[in-house]
Image: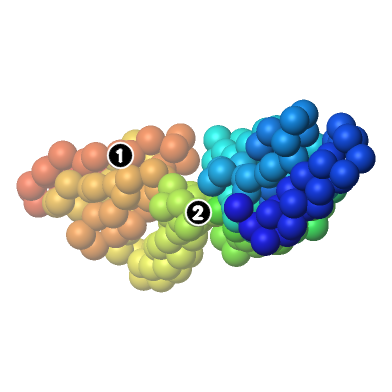
Amino acid sequence: MTQSCIYISKVSLLLETLYGMNLLVFFSTGSRVRKHCKEFGTSCLNCDEGTFMDQPTGLTECFPCARCDSGSGLKIKTACRTTSDTVCEPLEGFYCKDSSEKGCVEAQKHRSCQPGQYISQNGTVLRDTECSDCSDGTFSDGTLLTSCQPHTQCQHQLIKPGTASTDAECGEQSSGAVIVIVVPVICLVVAGISLLVVLILRKKGRCKYTAGKTVVNSSFKCSCLYKCIICFCLNSVYFSPQGVAVINEHRDSSSDTAEESSRLN
């Protein structure tokens, strides 16, 4: 029993003895009425552990201390004393959803921004997090939410355009595209060289052909470049006008001589 409690109890007893008063005495904070005045003076007791009384009272019981439940997103800010209740505050990452003059009563976890959004305003113990959508040409995949990142600018090939939640997908220039460009160029170069050789050889009379069907004065087979309408002999080169590779079978020199003689006659 505190000194103030004892003092008030003695005053109550004196008044009751002298004047026959039946008094209802209010005791100070941190204490409670042990027994109301009847035949003897009213007495008081300090609040038990886990209880408190924060105002003068004539009550026989102190109030139970509040509990800061982590399941409600709360933690202890100020521990309970006999003269004051527990004061709670939100856990880290939570904000106070419901409060009173004695502190936070209920807390809620800060919202999480979704992919395609960024944190425009960080949450506090009193305010929830604020999210905003990424602007055009930027994205946020959910790993870095403080700001949106610009889409990658593809130097060669764009495989998949970027969205608000994903970056653009880029690729290297495909080998098929290279082949489509390179093969025709090679064919044109070879055709140009071959045409030049044909003109030179025909001018010297070393290569003759008849409508692309046979080759005169050649004892070797002809061959053709793949996809190029150009045929080659050992000592002559000619184009197949029909676009067909002409293969000349081996012919001996005697048959060539006989054919040449018949033409002269």
For this orientation, the residue located farthest to the top is 38
- Residue lying at 74% horizontally and 48% vertically, measured from the top left: 9
Relative vertical location of residue 17 with respect to residue 144 in this rendering, above or below: above
The x and y percentages for residue 172 are 48, 57
Taking 225 as reference, is 95 left or right? right
Quarter of the C terminus within the rendering: top left
Q: Is residue 253 at all visible to an observer of this figure? A: yes
Mark earlier in primary sequence (1, 2): 2
Residue indicated by mark 1: 246
The x and y percentages for residue 210 are 38, 42
Mark 1 Cα-neighbour bin, 10 Å: few <14, some 14–19, many ≥20: many
Taking 103 as reference, is 66 left or right? left
- Amino acid under label 1? Val
- Residue lying at 24% horizontally and 55% vertically, measured from the top left: 233
Q: Nearer the viewer, residue 48 or 113?
A: 48
- Residue lying at 9% horizontally and 51% vertically, measured from the top left: 253
Residue indicated by mark 2: 171
The x and y percentages for residue 140 are 65, 51
The x and y percentages for residue 123 are 74, 54
Q: CA distance from mark 1 to mark 2?
A: 43 Å
- Of the two numbered discs 1 and 2 in the rendering, the one whose residue sits closer to the viewer: 2
The circle on residue 139 is none
Q: Nearer the viewer, residue 21 or 115?
A: 21
Relative vertical location of residue 140 with respect to residue 146 in this rendering, above or below: above
Mark 2 Cα-neighbour bin, 10 Å: few <14, some 14–19, many ≥20: few
Q: Is residue 26 at all visible to an observer of this figure? A: no
- Amino acid under label 2? Gly
Secondary structure state at the residue bearing disc 2? strand
